[in-house]
Amino acid sequence: MDFDLINEKRPEQALLISVDTGDFDAEVSINELEELAKTAGAEVAGVMIQKRPTVEGATYVGKGRLEEIAEFCDNNDIDIIIADSELSPIQVRNIEDRTDTRVVDRTTLILDIFASRANSKEGKLQVELAQLKYSLPRLTGKGTSLSRLGGGIGTRGPGETKLETDKRHIRRKIQYIKDELDAVEKRRNMQHSRRKKNGAVAVAIVGYTNAGKSTLMNRLTDAGVLQEDKLFATLDPTARKLTLPSGQQIMLVDTVGFISRLPHQLVDAFRSTLEEATYADVILNVCDASSDECHNHIETTNEILDSLFDGIGIPVPMINVFNKCDKINEEQEFELLSYSGDRYVGEVANPCVKISAKTGEGIDILLTEIENALPLTRKRVKLLIPFENGGIASKIRKDGVIHSEEYTEQGLVLDATAEISFLDKIKDYII
């Protein structure tokens, strides 16, 4: 007998449900929900979308569709129903009562994935904060049947219910986590201040989840970041040193992936992690070029970045990076992204680079674009350095790039790229 087969856990069978009110593309959203369900370890057994002017307040879907859902669950041994919207406690309870099947909504599913992916202390705190904030208004009790009765003057009456006790405990826990995260944020701000003081330059990789950000990070820096064909494969930010073709060293930071209709609890809870992008000198907006939703994904990322910059626009240079171009057919003409409306009018907003992080195609062009977008901190010059000041040449060799050197009677002639701040100190030797 094969005991491994007996002990092998059967994946949860999931039914996805959605109400199409026209507020968003229900087909695209349900496809994304299917990827989320698979990432969480479920096996999607069916999908049901109902078109309605509005969602049903008591049961999310209409009465007839709810009967169909109940019948489908009975006939297909469904373990869990996943709704592609945020459900109220009464909607969850009514669907569960009729179908006898556990119900979760889109936000709960994403929180579950985040909880399984967070590794750092900060990431775990952020996930717990988001879960507590989401669960607090959804706590339900049984009124005075869970009351605690006290004794003595001032304690008579229904007392404090178990529900009220739970809410008070959660509020205390939320405040404790906020204090912990505030301390983490202060340390991060000190690190960023120190980095700016030292003249360090940072480039942040942002973009839709599963666009290949971690693969790009590994391609550029050999960072060893987990890369999987799953949504939210990595949550915690990773920073690695990257040397550009000019010799300039920068810090490359990989951030958590975005998703359309990202629950505001997650944006708020992960704000400190997402704000890595706000400290960057250049932002790489990575998207999956092979996806039909490529342009929408870039817009989703821009909207979230706008919120992080308090709606004032994105004040740092940004490069649109179209990844996975190796998956595009040669005949397929790929149109570079252009914006219209309030953001940009009739022009390509940012430099656009087509790459394949998997094969390395276009990486050299991307590195050149990064150099072009960086603030001007280095300059290429020709220097004549007296032999008695050889320490200057050693400094340039260590921190800059020497393109050529020649020993002459007057001294050492260098064609070099160095920090402008250092060149200002040795300007007498610039030819």
Image (cartoon, rainbow, N blue to C red):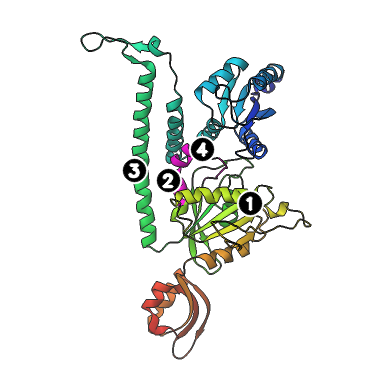
**Mark 1 secondary-structure assignment:** helix
Indicate whether 126 appears above or below 292: above
Residue furthest to the front: 53
**Mark 4 secondary-structure assignment:** loop
Q: Residue 172 at x, y = what percent?
A: 34, 29
Q: Residue 289 at x, y = what percent?
A: 67, 52
Looking at this view, is 124 or 411 the one in front? 124
State the quadrant of the N terminus.
Answer: top right
Say which of marks 3 and 4 sits in front: 4
Q: Which residues are magenta?
A: 256-276
Q: In this rendering, would 53 be left or right of 155?
A: right
Say which of marks 1 and 3 sits in front: 1
Decide whether residue 267 is among the magenta residues: yes
Looking at this view, is 157 or 200 the one in front? 157
**Mark 3 secondary-structure assignment:** helix
Q: Earlier in the sequence, mark 2 or mark 3?
A: 3
Say which of marks 2 and 4 sits in front: 4
Say which of marks 2 and 3 sits in front: 2
Looking at this view, is 84 or 404 the one in front? 84
Instruction: Give amino acid for label 2.
Output: Ser
Q: In this rendering, would 76 be left or right of 168?
A: right
Badge 1 is on which residue?
295
Badge 3 is on which residue?
183
Badge 2 is on which residue?
272
Circles 2, 3 touching at the beta carbon (< 8 Å): no
User: Which numbered tag is attached to residue 263?
Assistant: 4
Instruction: Give amino acid for label 1.
Output: His
Q: Earlier in the sequence, mark 2 or mark 4?
A: 4
